[in-house]
Image (cartoon, rainbow, N blue to C red):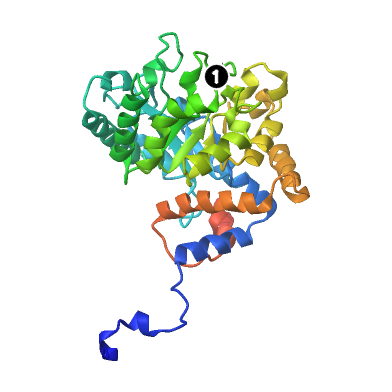
Amino acid sequence: MTPIEAIPASARLVGAPAPLDVDEVYREQRIAAMTPEQKIAALIMIHVPGTDAATIRSVIDAYGFGGVILMGDNVGGPASSVAELTAGLSSDPGLPVLTAIDQEGGTVRRLQEDRGPAARDLWGLDPSATQQAFADRSALVASAGVMINFGVVADVTTDRSSFIRSRTLGETPAAAAERVAAAVRGESGVVLSTLKHFPGHGASPDDSHVSIPQSSIDLATWRETHAIPFQAGIDAGAPLVMTGHLLFDQVSPVPASLSPTWITILRDELGFDGVIVTDDLLMLQRSGVAQYSDPTTNALSALAAGNDLVLFVLPADPSTVGVDFTALIGTLTTALNDGRLDESRIDASLERVLTLRRDDSGVSGPYVDCGLKCWGLSPRALASEN
């Protein structure tokens, strides 16, 4: 018989509950404390123009948005100056707002210090060169205080007229897959990699910024081609995937960003369990297709389809493109309350999104509502302004 002293203490606790995961408890408590409006707002990522952190933060705090994307007009200088901006965006240190940027290299780069090779430059090189390029790129993004890089293009095409061709990481699915996986490995542990534009912009030559690219390939063909780089990036550990406004009419009657079918394929077939974010929803409006002219309807469809985050890259005056934040959140909240948005699915999205935010905080422990001081509204803060 084995002496009891030789049995680990944990094994002797027959029937003892498993130790608590403090971060899981935090997320559960945080979600339980959120109003329906707060839940909806936390699943919206926006762009606010300018380089004034106080202005951007005032918009984030006023509505409780979960994320902000930095565009060219937010970058007023080197990465160090951007870091000063991002440092002032979060009111709650225990749950920092998500920050994201498009830093592919080459023609798509917001941080101009990035002189590393663009995707097209990496085609003829060993995948290790891609890994190094994205390791360097991620270090720059991180030095700017940005958490997420919307920077790994997992599209593939052999069509020389394709809008996306020069931004892909290889001409064949296999070549692109090797470099997509390498790019994810290069960014791992430094920034959060995002694979885009699912299910594959290369299936059509058109530009999704001003149209809805369409393809008639069937699902079997997609599995043998465009799926391969995305699967490689997912297997390499990419924590985010961006859905594109791409219409594969043999698979779904609506663009992938609004399609429950494509979200199901991404989750169940490719095995992705991270955060799914839409491409900029304003692109759907710019397509000129009447069906997608209303931004609130598009956001509702995107969340109902299973996206975790909806993205709006807004101008200085959102009303010029038909976006009213109060009306947007109000309509989506009504949809949550009346069941058009399933609350359990919204809570699952919040779980994924809050995990990214909490992990970046470096803080542990249960949720404690810090009240007005988290929003700069404590009596002391208000007194200092008077």
Q: Where is mark 1, residue-wise?
A: 209
Residue 184 x %, y %: 34, 37
Residue 196 x %, y %: 45, 30
Decide which of 230, 186 is in the foreground and name it: 230
Decide which of 371, 171 is in the foreground and name it: 171
Decide which of 318, 43 is in the foreground and name it: 43
Q: Is residue 384 above or below residue 89?
A: below
Check the picture and name the quadrant holding the N terminus.
bottom left
Question: For numbered disc 1, what is the local secondary structure?
Answer: loop
Q: Is residue 88 above or below residue 281?
A: below
Tell me which residue sits at (68%, 29%) in the image. 295
- Is residue 215 left or right of 174 when viewed as pictured? right
The tally of labels here is 1
Residue 32 x %, y %: 62, 62
Tell me which residue sits at (56%, 62%) in the image. 28
Observer able to see residue 52: no
Q: Disc 1 residue type? A: His
Tell me which residue sits at (35%, 18%) in the image. 171
Residue 242 x %, y %: 49, 34
Q: Quadrant of residue 238?
A: top left
